[in-house]
């Protein structure tokens, strides 16, 4: 397998990364700087800044690959055969039953160990 771990990034991508980071930092600073305003407006401002920063990041090569990965993952999720309602209910009940059985066994073991240690030490 001949995969190169470090791919060359263009200068434009580095500039976009830096701009996105500066934009995020400015959004956080503005959130606290404008503390006298209603919190709803400040949160909406931060959400807008994060959306702009993500939009900038999606124009980079890593952003494009991430977007392509998300699209492929969405397609794969559509191919999954999900269990029916009855299968899900049966599996859930089996898990509950096993938890109760194992809990009962652990309680018996704990009681036996407590009894044996009390017998040895008294």
Image (cartoon, rainbow, N blue to C red):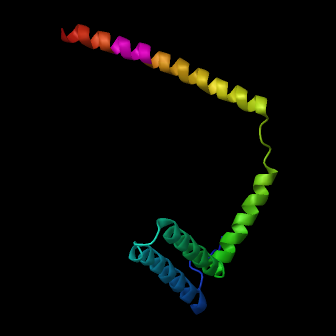
Query: Is residue 53 or residue 43 the one in the foreground?
Result: 43
Give how far across and how far down residue 109 sits, in percent.
41, 15
Left or right of 115 in this view: 24: right
The residue positioned 78% from the left and 48% from the top of the image is 80
Span highlighted in magenta in the image: 107-113
Q: Quadrant of residue 20?
A: bottom right
- Foreground of the two, 24 or 2: 24
Is any part of residue 14 visible from this angle?
yes
Q: Residue furthest bottom?
A: 11
Q: Locate residue 12, reporting x and y percent.
A: 60, 91
Q: Quadrant of residue 93?
A: top right
Q: Is 116 on the left or on the right of 42, as rendered? A: left
Quadrant location, the N terminus: bottom right
For residue 15, above or below residue 97: below
In x, y percent, where is residue 107? 43, 16
In the figure, 122 relative to 46: above or below?
Answer: above
Q: Residue at horizontal 31%, vertical 9%?
A: 115
Q: Is residue 97 magenta?
A: no
* Prevailing SS of the magenta stretch: helix
Q: Residue at x 51, y 68 (%)?
A: 43
The residue sitting at 77% across, 37% down in the picture is 83
Residue 42 lies left or right of residue 2; in this view the side is: left
Q: Is residue 16 found left or right of 117 in the rendered image? A: right
Q: Count the marks: how many?
A: 0
Quadrant where the C terminus is found in the figure = top left
Can residue 10 be seen in the rendering of this structure?
no
């Amino acid at each position: 397998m001949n995969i190169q771990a470090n791919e060359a990034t263009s200068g434009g991508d580095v500039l976009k990364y830096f701009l996105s980071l500066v934009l995020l930092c400015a959004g956080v600073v503005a959130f606290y700087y404008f503390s006298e305003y209603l919190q709803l407006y400040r949160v909406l401002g931060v959400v807008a800044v994060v959306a702009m920063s993500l939009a900038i990041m999606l124009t980079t090569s890593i952003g494009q690959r991430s977007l392509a990965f998300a699209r492929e993952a969405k397609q794969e999720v559509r191919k999954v055969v999900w269990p029916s309602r009855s299968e899900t209910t049966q599996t859930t009940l089996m898990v509950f039953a096993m938890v109760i059985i194992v809990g009962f066994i652990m309680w018996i073991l704990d009681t036996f160990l407590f009894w044996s240690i009390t017998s040895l030490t008294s």
